[in-house]
Structures are given as C-alpha cells and as structure tokens.
Image (cartoon, rainbow, N blue to C red):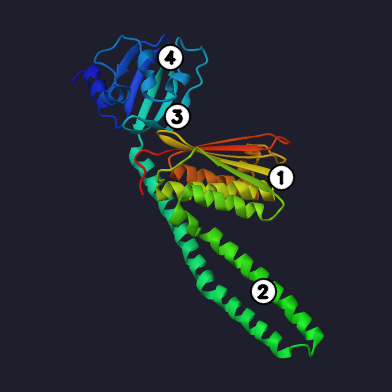
C-alpha cells in the first residue's frame, strides 16, 4: 500500500467528516462523511460555496476568497436537516479544513436531561401545592371558624378581646389569601383545565389585583389546543418575566402577547421598567435576575425554541420567545 492510498484510507476511517478547500473555495479533499453532511457530489475541483447553505450559519463564516488572516470558527450543535452537527473551521496553508461531527445523540441526551429536570421540578411543585391546599388551607379555615365562634360567645362583654379577635381574623384571612396564591403559583389549575390563554389571562388579572402594576394580555384568537409541555413552559416563562419586571425593573406597565403562527407560537413580554444590560445579569454570579434569565433559557432550550432579550438601561425590557409546534410531545 503506497502512501497516497494509506492517507486516503486513514481519512476515510475518521469518525467525523473532513473537508479541505483552497482559499478560493475549490474543494480539494473530502471523506464520505463530509460529503454526506454537506450533500456534496463525487469528485473534487468544484466550488464549495453553493453547498454551504446545507448547514445553517456556515455561509456566514466562509466568504471566498478567504481573508489572509482566517481566524477559524466553531459552530456547536447546529440544527441540520437530519440532526445536530458541530462544525469547526481551521486555517491550513492556502486554504481551510472543516471537521463535522454528528452530535445528535448527545443533543438528544441533553434534551432528555433537561426534560427530566423540569418534570421533577413540576412534580415537586404539584406535591407542595397539594400539601398546602389539602393541609394548611383547611387548618386555617378551622381556626377562623373557631375564632368566629369565640367572638359570638364573648358578645359585647369584652370589647378589647373582640378587637383582638377581629385583628387575628383579618390576619388569618390575609394568610389564607397568600397561601391560595402560593398554591396557585405552584400549580395553576386553570392551565390544566382551560389552557394557556385562560391561564395567562388569570395571571395578569392577579398581577393587576395588587393595584401597583398594570398587566395587559393580548392574543391572536388562539382556539386550538396547545400541548401541555409547551403550555406549561410558556406559562412558567411568563411568570418569571413578570416577576423580574415587578421585583427588579420597577415597571408600571407589562404587556404580554401570545401569537400563533402556522409552525410556531411566539410569546412576547414587554415592560416599561428601568431596563438593564442583558449580558451583565446573565454572566454575573449571584445575581437573582441572572438566575431567573438562565432558568428561562433552560426552559426555552427544553422546548427547542429561541429566546431574544432586548434591553438597555432606562428603556425597559422586551423578551421574545418562539417555540416550534411541530413534533412536540404532549
């Protein structure tokens, strides 16, 4: 076996796709995996440029002829027609080399892990909600009934004691309302019973009941059923964004929009608060807002969607989440 044959055999046996092109974009070498990933024809000597669109984003990094100081690049876990690919471009003398690795299995494993984590979180929320609703709620109601009965027993005999009972009854009522609100936040029954639109309407109404913030909800006449995983994910994301707007941004008005497209659903949450620099909060350890935004990113990844955050100090926040509806599990 001569050296050329040996080299060809080694290149062909690589567990990843390999493509080598000249600085003008002429294909010089490719193994079978590389040809498959880019859908290349047999042979060499043709322009590579027309095949770059097979992998999203690849054409943005390769403009022929190459610049003298070609920096190289990494495209990690890019969605391709038949799975997920990681593409790395590196400069070689008078050209470049592309290595392409199929990372579909690892991406699917990551997806399953995210789903498992989020499902475990929701299961814990359901358990806590049930314990609060079935345990603490009735206990408070019983105490309230006993105090009402005690007030009747006292009648007009002890004004000071009656005032104390009135005060405690008010505190119990406040506690009951707070517990009901916590239980609802943990597991919104309206989402399960009536769907995402009704749940978001109810969420905005509860925000408005505080009298401090005006939350408006708009939707594009969504009538069809939105699957449970998508609906719950978008509801939790909206909760997090509204919480950030109220707690950190000191917003006065929050607008929530839900728009149904043929292949996707878009959630937009906009506030008129103080705004912030997104990268600062996402990358600064220990900042609650950054943690909330990372939680949103995790949920968006689990749904296979995209998350765009637009904000500047003093200019409020606009968050846009788009989730594909094709092939979503229940």
Q: Is residue 134 left or right of residue 224?
A: right
User: Mark 3 near mark 4, Cβ–Cβ under 8 Å?
Assistant: no
Visible residue check, residue 285: no
Q: Of label 3 and label 2, which has the lower sequence position? A: 3
CA–CA distance between discs 3 and 4? 22 Å
CA–CA distance between discs 1 and 3? 40 Å
Q: Is residue 202 depicted above or below 312 in this figure?
A: below
- Mark 3 sits on what residue? 75
Closer mark to the observer between disc 3 and disc 2: 2
Residue at 56% in and 47% down = 238
CA–CA distance between discs 4 and 2? 78 Å
Q: Is residue 71 depicted above or below 68 in this figure?
A: below
Label 3: state its secondary structure. strand
Closer mark to the observer between disc 3 and disc 4: 3
Quadrant position of residue 261? top left
Query: Few, some or many C-alpha atoms within 10 Å of disc 1 (few <14, some 14-19, many ≥20)?
Result: some
> Residue 285, percent across and down?
63, 47
- Mark 4 sits on what residue? 93
Pick the residue in front: 220 or 120.
220
Residue at 68% in and 51% down = 247
- Mark 2 sits on what residue? 172
Residue at 32% in and 22% down = 38
Pick the residue in front: 69 or 110.
110
Closer mark to the observer between disc 1 and disc 4: 1
């Amino acid at each position: 076996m001569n050296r050329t044959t040996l080299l060809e055999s080694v290149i062909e046996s690589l567990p990843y796709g390999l493509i080598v092109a000249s600085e003008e974009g002429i294909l010089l070498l490719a193994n079978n995996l590389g040809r498959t990933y880019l859908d290349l024809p047999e042979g060499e000597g043709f322009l590579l440029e027309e095949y770059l669109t097979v992998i999203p984003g690849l054409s943005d990094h390769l403009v022929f002829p190459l610049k003298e100081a070609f920096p190289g690049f990494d495209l990690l876990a890019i969605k391709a027609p038949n799975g997920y690919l990681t593409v790395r471009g590196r400069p070689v003398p008078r050209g470049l080399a592309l290595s392409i690795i199929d990372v579909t299995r690892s991406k699917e494993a990551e997806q399953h892990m995210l789903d498992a984590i989020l499902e475990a979180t929701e299961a814990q929320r359901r358990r806590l909600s049930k314990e609060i609703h079935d345990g603490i709620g009735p206990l408070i109601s019983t105490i309230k009934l006993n105090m009402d009965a005690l007030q009747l027993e006292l009648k007009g005999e002890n004004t000071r004691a009656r005032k104390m009972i009135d005060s405690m009854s008010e505190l119990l009522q406040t506690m009951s309302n707070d517990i009901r609100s916590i239980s609802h936040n943990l597991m919104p029954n309206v989402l399960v019973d009536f769907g995402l639109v009704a749940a978001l309407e109810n969420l905005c109404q509860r925000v408005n009941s505080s009298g401090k913030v005006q939350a408006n909800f708009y939707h594009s006449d969504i009538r069809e059923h939105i699957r449970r995983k998508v609906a719950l994910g978008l509801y939790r994301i909206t909760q997090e964004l509204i919480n950030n707007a109220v707690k950190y941004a000191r917003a006065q008005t929050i607008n929530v929009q839900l728009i149904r497209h043929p292949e996707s659903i878009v959630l937009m949450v906009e506030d008129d608060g103080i705004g912030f620099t997104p990268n600062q909060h996402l990358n600064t350890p220990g900042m609650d807002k950054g943690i909330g935004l990372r939680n949103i990113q995790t949920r968006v990844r689990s749904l296979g969607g995209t998350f765009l955050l637009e904000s500047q100090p003093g200019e409020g926040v606009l968050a846009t989440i788009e989730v594909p509806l094709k092939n979503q599990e229940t």
